[in-house]
Amino acid sequence: MFAPEPPPTLVHRRVLALVGPYGSGKTELALALAAAAAARGDRALVADLDVIKPYFRSREATLRSAAAGVTTLAPPGALAFADLPIVPADLRAALRDLDRTVIIDVGGDVAGARVLGSVADALPAESSEVWFVVNRHRPFVQTVARAVTLARAIAAATGMALSGVVANGHLLDYTTAGIVLDGLEFSRAVAAEVGVPIVALMAPAELAHELVGAPDLPPLVPVVRAMALQSLGGVVNAHGGCA
């Protein structure tokens, strides 16, 4: 699994799309939530719509996802590793499967969001939600105003309304509980401007015990990093071994 224990039941609708800036943590969250859903007995599927950045994509962790009982939907064969705007052929069928929990890992920024917009007609509002994942330490979202502008632009590109913000303030291996909480306050300001709630707080699993007593803490998703940058040419599973 991608977390030491299943995170809280956060996904209240059948389909959840994760959007946000490049490198904000969408893939890690998709893997963690899907693994938790599978652990509860759901038929969980991660739909990899990241056609923008080839280094951190759900498809890179297909074998680990399968071991956790999660199906990964991505372009087949050699196309799985192409940096091309390919939407998996079975995506619409998966979105209409009422017996599946579907987590959609969307590519970064507006360019990635347009891909989600191309299948928005298969996402009925009553059974779908869209979360904006933000890490204030990523480029281009280091002020509230910039993050809000991007959130609104992504929503416009998808043709769907945002339903929540996920706080994921971190600096990789240099993350502290203080950095996580600082990111939470930043994300609260973004959420207030956009007009949606904070739906979750992501944090490295090893810091979870330091955060539990913090006041007004949103649902905490402790994450063990599933993906790690190996080189500019690709990724490996953070726990060792190629995906």
Image (spheres, rainbow, N blue to C red):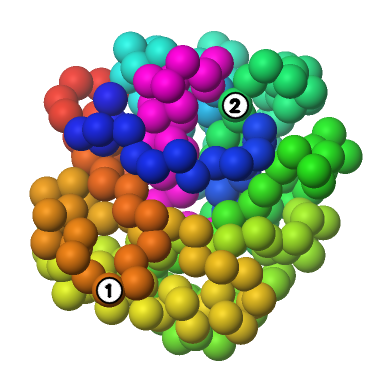
Could you tell me the amino acid type at mark 2? Answer: Thr
The quarter holding residue 191 reads bottom right
Q: Is residue 222 above or below residue 179?
A: above
The quarter holding residue 225 reads top left
Image location (x, y in percent) of residue 202:
33, 55
Which residue is at the far right? 121
Q: Is residue 81 above or below residue 136?
A: above
Who is closer to the viewer here, 113 or 231?
113
Image location (x, y in percent) of residue 63:
35, 15
Q: Tag 2's secondary structure?
A: strand
- The answer to whether 138 appears left or right of 78 in the picture is left
Q: Tag 1's secondary structure?
A: loop
Image location (x, y in percent) of residue 21:
51, 62
User: Within 10 Å of the Cα at label 1, are there few (<14), some (14-19), or many (20+) other Cα atoms?
Assistant: few
- The residue drawn where x is 46% and y is 48% is 26
Label 2 vs 1, first from the N-terminus: 2
Magenta stretch encompasses residue 26: yes
- The residue drawn where x is 33% and y is 66% is 217
Frontmost of labels 2 and 1 is 1
Return the mark for residue 101. 2
Magenta stretch encompasses residue 105: no
Residue 110 visible in the current orientation = yes
User: Within 10 Å of the Cα at label 2, are there few (<14), some (14-19), or many (20+) other Cα atoms?
Assistant: many
Query: Disc 2 to disc 1, how far (Cα)?
Result: 31 Å
- The residue drawn where x is 27% and y is 73% is 215
- The answer to whether 111 appears left or right of 147 in the picture is right
Could you tell me the amino acid type at mark 1? Answer: Pro
Who is closer to the viewer here, 69 or 57?
69
Image location (x, y in percent) of residue 223:
27, 44
Region in magenta = 20-44
Return the mark for residue 215. 1
